[in-house]
Image: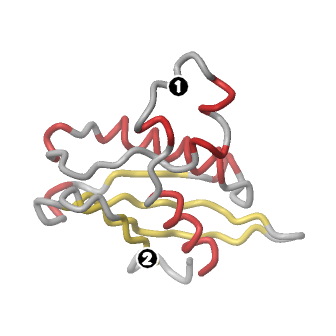
């Protein structure tokens, strides 16, 4: 699970090519490893971020670049802002990791710093032996 956590951290801390270029006319590039990652949230205010859009982008990136996760098991959810500092966003990532014969459940908590753009991923507290 630690390898999955590290790989998700790398994915979510990487800005895809779409954050610098308009890939609307190049659908194959937008779905390739050239666009690995998601856009940065550095410098954005929390009021300007749509929870639904951010969760959708995160889920899309994980499904596109992390084949070890069983697609239908992946759940990405926004943690209420009242539980986080003003400059942080917390998102919970849950699912099942595909292994030879067994699906291993995991739950990670990602903390997004809107000042620096950095994302930290750790096991979610109080969620059992996942991650």
Which residue appears farthest toward the left when viewing the image? Answer: 86
> At 34% from the left edge and 51% from the top edge, which residue is drawn?
78
Q: Do labels 1 and 2 touch, CB within 8 Å? A: no
Q: Is residue 58 above or below residue 110?
A: above
Where is residue 86? Give x, y as percent. Answer: 10, 60
Which residue appears farthest toward the front when viewing the image? Answer: 21
Q: Which quadrant of the rendered structure holds the C terminus?
A: bottom right
> At 37% from the left edge and 35% from the top edge, which residue is drawn?
53
Residue on which disc 1 sits:
23
Q: Nearer the viewer, residue 44 or 107?
A: 44
Describe the colour scheme in one phrase: secondary structure
Q: Decide if residue 63 is on the left or right side of residue 127.
A: right
Q: Decide if residue 51 is on the left or right side of residue 57.
A: left
Q: CA distance from mark 1 to mark 2?
A: 32 Å
Query: Tag 2, which secondary structure?
Result: strand
Which residue appears farthest toward the top when viewing the image? Answer: 25
Residue on which disc 2 sits:
122
Q: Which quadrant of the rendered structure holds the N terminus?
A: bottom right
Residue 130's disc number: none
Q: Decide if residue 45 is on the left or right side of residue 29.
A: left
Question: Of marks 1 and 2, which one's residue comes earlier in the chain?
Answer: 1
Query: Tag 1, which secondary structure?
Result: loop
Where is residue 122? Give x, y as percent. Answer: 43, 76
Q: Residues within 10 Å of mark 1 (few under 14, many from 20)?
A: some
């Amino acid at each position: 699970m630690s390898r999955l956590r590290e790989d998700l951290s790398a994915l979510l801390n990487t800005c895809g090519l779409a954050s610098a270029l308009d890939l609307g006319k190049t659908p194959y590039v937008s779905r390739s490893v050239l666009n690995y990652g998601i856009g940065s949230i550095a410098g954005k205010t929390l009021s300007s971020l749509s929870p639904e859009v951010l969760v959708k982008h995160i889920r899309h990136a994980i499904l596109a670049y992390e084949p070890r996760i069983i697609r239908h098991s992946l759940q990405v959810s926004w943690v209420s802002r009242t539980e986080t500092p003003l400059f942080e966003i917390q998102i919970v990532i849950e699912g099942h990791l595909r292994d030879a014969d067994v699906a291993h459940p995991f739950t990670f908590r990602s903390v997004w710093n809107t000042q620096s753009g950095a994302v930290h991923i750790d096991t979610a507290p109080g969620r059992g032996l996942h991650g």
